[in-house]
Amino acid sequence: MVLGANWEIVFTSLTIILVLLYTGTIIFTVFFVILENRDPVKTISWALFILLIPVIGIVSYIVFGQSFRKQKIFSRKGLNDLERISSMSKNQIIDLPNMAFLKDERIRNKINIIRLLLNNSKALLTERNKIDVMNSGEETFRSIIYELEGAKDHIHMEFYRWESDNIGNRIRDVLVRKARQGITIRIIFDDVGSWKLSKKYIASLNREGIETYAFMPVRFPYFTSKVNFRNHRKIIVIDGTIGFVGGINIADKYIHGNKKVGSWRDTHLRLEGESVHSLQIIFNVDWYFVSGEILLDPGRYFPEHLVDETHLIQITSSGPDSDWSSIMQAFFCAITTAQKTIYITTPYFSPNESILTALKTGALSGVDVRLILPAKSDSTIAYWNSFSYVSELLEAGIKVYLYENGFNHAKLLMVDGIFSTVGTANIDYRSFDLNFEANALIYNETVTRKLEESFFNDIAHSRLINEDEWKNRPKKQILYESLARILGPLY
C-alpha cells in the first residue's frame, strides 16, 4: 500500500510538472510573439492559433512564424553592383526634378512612387526600354524559347516553380543545346516551389556544365528556419539585353491549366533595354546567395543596349533580406495617390490594414476601384480568405469581380491610365513580408492602356458581385471565410 501511494504521489507530481511546463511553453511562446512587435493582425493570429491549438500552433510558429526582415538572411555587403546602384540611385533622386519626362503632368503626379522606390530599394528609373506584354502561357513560352535559342553568351534563369513536365523538358532540351554551343547557363529554382523537379532532370543539366542551385534547401535541421521564406521570383536574363518577369512559372499548367481550376490565365513581360540590367542585378545578388560566387565583368553582364524606344520602368525587388517592404510600399503609394482609377487583378487577396484602408479610402473619395479575384482557386485557404474581405470592399463602393474562365493568376495593378505594375507579387501578406519577389513598375500610357484592355477583357469573363446577394450568402461560407481570415496572415 505504501509503495502504491508513493507511485501515486510521483505520478501526480510528474503530471503537475508536465502541465506547468506545457502551460509555461504556451505562455512563453505567446509572450515571444508579442515581443516581436510585428503587424498586430499577425500577432493576434499567431497568439490565437497557439492558444487554441497549442501543439500544432507552437510547431507551426517555429516553422512558419519567424521574421527575418530585421535580422537579414544573408549579407549583401561587398557586392560592388549594389554599391554602384546605391550611388546611382542617390544621383537620380537629386536629378529627378529636372528630368524631361516630368513635363507630362500625369507622370509628374506619380513622382512620389519613383522617389519612394529610389529610396527604399534603390530601384533605378530606366528610360530606354521596349516592353512586350504577354497574356498567356503559350505566348510567353514561345517568346522565351525563341530568345533562349538566340543566346550568344549567357542565360540566367530564376523561378519559384520548375517542373520536369512537357514544357520543362522542352526548355531543358534548348538549354542543353545552348550549353553545348558554349553558352554559360546559371539556374536558380526554389527548393519548396520546385519540389516536383526530379533529381534526374537536374543531373541532366549538370552533366552539360549548366550550374543549378536550389534556393534555401529545406533540409533538417535547418528546415525550421528556411521553409517559410521562399524565392517567388520568375526572372530570365539573356546576354544582359533581354529579360522576362511576371507571374508565369515553368510548368505545363500555365499552358493547359489543370483539372481543379481549368484553364490558366496569366501575364508576363518581355523587356529589352536598360531595365534588363536591373533584373540582372537581382539575379546576381541571388546567385551570390546560393553559390557564393560574385559575377564580375560588367562589360559582359551589363552590355550597352541598342533600344531607342522610351518606356519608363523601375524594377524593384523585396524579400526578408531587404530593409523595407518595398513592393507593398509602392502599391500603397500608387493607391493613395490615385486620382481616377485603380484596377487590380490578384489570385490571392489578403491585404494588410494599410492596403485595405487605402483601397476603401480611394473608393469612398470617388476613385473608380475595381478588383478581379478568381472564382476558382488552387489554394483553399487563400480562396476563402480573399472572400472574407469582399463585404467591406463592397460597402466602400469597390467593384469586385469573380473571374470564371478558369484560374486568373495574373498580378496586375493599374492606376490612372499612366502607371502599372506587373510582376511576381500578390496582394497578400506572404508576398509583402515573406517571399522574395520582383516587379516591374511602368510609367507609360501605351503599356498601361494595353494592360487595361486585358483587364476589361477579363471582366467580360467575370461575374460582378452583387452586394445584396453577397449579404445573403450561406452561413457555412461565412464560417469558412472567418476561419480563413485568421489563418490568412500565417500561411
Image: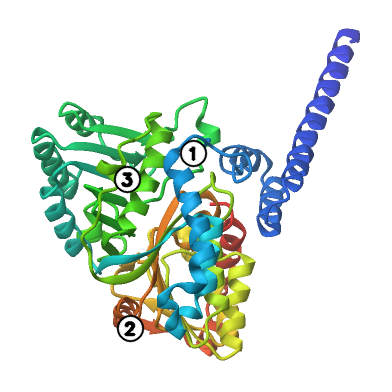
Say if 466 sits above or below 359 in the image.
below
Label annotation for residue 158: 3
From the image, tell me which residue sits under label 2: 456
Task: From the top left corner, tell me how far across and down residue 361 is, in percent.
Answer: 62, 82
Task: From the top left corner, tell me how far across and down residue 316 is, in percent.
Answer: 44, 57
From the viewer's perspective, tell me whether residue 477 is left or right of residue 379: right
What is the three-letter code of the residue carrying label 3? Glu
Say if 486 sits above or below 364 in the image.
above
Which numbered disc flags the more N-terminal residue, 2 or 1? 1
> Which of the pair 348/183 is nearer the observer?
183
Disc 2 versus disc 3: nearer the observer:
3
Of the 4 image quadrants, the one containing the N terminus is top right
> Which of the pair 260/184 is nearer the observer?
184
Label annotation for residue 227: 1
Element type at marker 3?
strand
From the viewer's perspective, tell me whether residue 119 is left or right of residue 57: left
Label annotation for residue 105: none
Q: Residues within 10 Å of mark 3 (few under 14, many from 20)?
A: many
Could you tell me if the residues under marks 2 and 1 are in contact, i.e. CB atoms within 8 Å? no
Q: Who's the residue at 49% across and 25% down the image?
A: 220
From the viewer's perspective, tell me whether residue 21 is left or right of residue 407: right
> Which of the pair 429/115 is nearer the observer?
115
Distance between the Cα atoms at labels 2 and 3? 31 Å
Disc 3 versus disc 1: nearer the observer:
3
In the rendered image, which quarter is residue 438 located in? bottom left
> Which of the pair 67/107 is nearer the observer?
107
Q: Who's the residue at 50% across and 38% down the image?
A: 76
In the rendered image, which quarter is residue 64 located in? top right
Q: Who's the residue at 74% across and 41% down the image?
A: 32
What is the three-letter code of the residue carrying label 2? Phe
Residue placed furthest toward the right: 2
